[in-house]
């Protein structure tokens, strides 16, 4: 009799993974598409994960809200981060990491950054936006960013037009954040 019970248990265990296998592809398909956020140099950019955090610097008391959009790729990931002043709710900095083809046929992470004050800027750079943290667990906001210069090794890019990027208008809501 114990053999029969063991067999039945094994059958139940085998059925459970089959159900999981059926659900997994639909989640993967949904994740691989992502959620549209903006256009970067005219091309759609979607994210597969979004999160936020509100930090208070221990010594200065400066509050910063950071919203991170991550796009999972087959190899690696891309990110777009928006940094807001937690007190004024104004956009202070944008950081973008994109996987780009190089002249030698490989791929590199192209890093872009634009600050309201300081940093290397293109003369026509623009940055503005606001964040709403009135909901205790989700953030919403917007950003307008254009003419962001690549920080390092821009001469290695296969497509020279990607040395400076512009983003279409960004609108987001319901992004979970923690303090």
Image: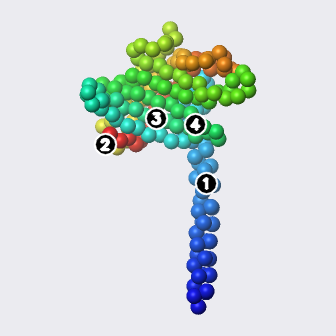
Specify which label sits upstream in the sequence, 1 or 3.
1
Q: Quadrant of the C terminus?
A: top left
For the point 52% across and 37% down, the residue is 70
Relative vertical location of residue 16 with respect to residue 56 in this rendering, above or below = below
> Are circles 1 and 3 on residues that touch, CB within 8 Å?
no
Q: How many marks?
A: 4
Q: Circle 2 sits in a helix, a strand or a loop, which is it?
A: loop
Specify which label sits upstream in the sequence, 3 or 4.
3
Q: Residue 164 carries which label?
A: none
> Are circles 2 and 1 on residues that touch, CB within 8 Å?
no
Q: Quadrant of the N terminus?
A: bottom right
> Are circles 4 and 2 on residues that touch, CB within 8 Å?
no
Relative vertical location of residue 101 with respect to residue 126 in this rendering, above or below = below
Tell me where residue 93 appears, x and y as whole percent.
Answer: 43, 23
Circle 3 is placed at which residue position?
Answer: 68
Q: Distance between the residues labelled 1 and 3?
A: 25 Å
Badge 3: few (under 14), some or many (20 or more) residues near its Cα, within 10 Å? many
Q: Circle 3 sits in a helix, a strand or a loop, which is it?
A: strand
Circle 1 is placed at which residue position?
Answer: 26
* Left or right of residue 85, residue 82 in this image: right
Which of pointers 4 and 2 indicates the residue nearer the eye?
Answer: 4
Most extreme residue toward the top is 123
Tell me where residue 37 appears, x and y as whole percent.
Answer: 52, 34
Front residue of 12 and 6? 6
Badge 2: few (under 14), some or many (20 or more) residues near its Cα, within 10 Å? few
Specify which label sits upstream in the sequence, 4 or 1.
1
Circle 2 is placed at which residue position?
Answer: 136
Q: Is residue 166 visible?
A: no
Which of pointers 2 and 3 indicates the residue nearer the eye?
Answer: 3
Circle 4 is placed at which residue position?
Answer: 77
Which of pointers 3 and 4 indicates the residue nearer the eye?
Answer: 4
């Amino acid at each position: 009799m114990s053999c029969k019970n063991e067999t039945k248990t094994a059958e139940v265990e085998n059925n459970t993974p089959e159900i999981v296998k059926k659900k997994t592809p639909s989640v993967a398909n949904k994740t691989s598409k992502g959620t549209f956020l903006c256009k970067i140099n005219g091309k759609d950019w979607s994210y597969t994960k979004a999160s936020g955090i509100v930090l208070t610097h221990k010594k200065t008391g400066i509050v910063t809200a950071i919203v991170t959009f991550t796009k999972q790729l087959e190899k690696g990931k891309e990110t777009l981060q928006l940094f807001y002043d937690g007190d004024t709710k104004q956009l202070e900095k944008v950081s973008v990491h994109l996987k780009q083809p190089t002249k030698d046929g490989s791929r590199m992470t192209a890093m872009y950054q634009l600050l309201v004050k300081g940093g290397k800027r293109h003369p026509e750079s623009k940055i503005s936006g606001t964040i709403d943290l009135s909901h205790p667990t989700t953030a919403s906001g917007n950003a307008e960013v254009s003419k962001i210069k690549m920080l390092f090794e821009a001469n290695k890019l296969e497509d020279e037009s990607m040395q400076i990027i512009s983003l279409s208008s960004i609108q987001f809501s319901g992004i979970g954040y923690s303090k």
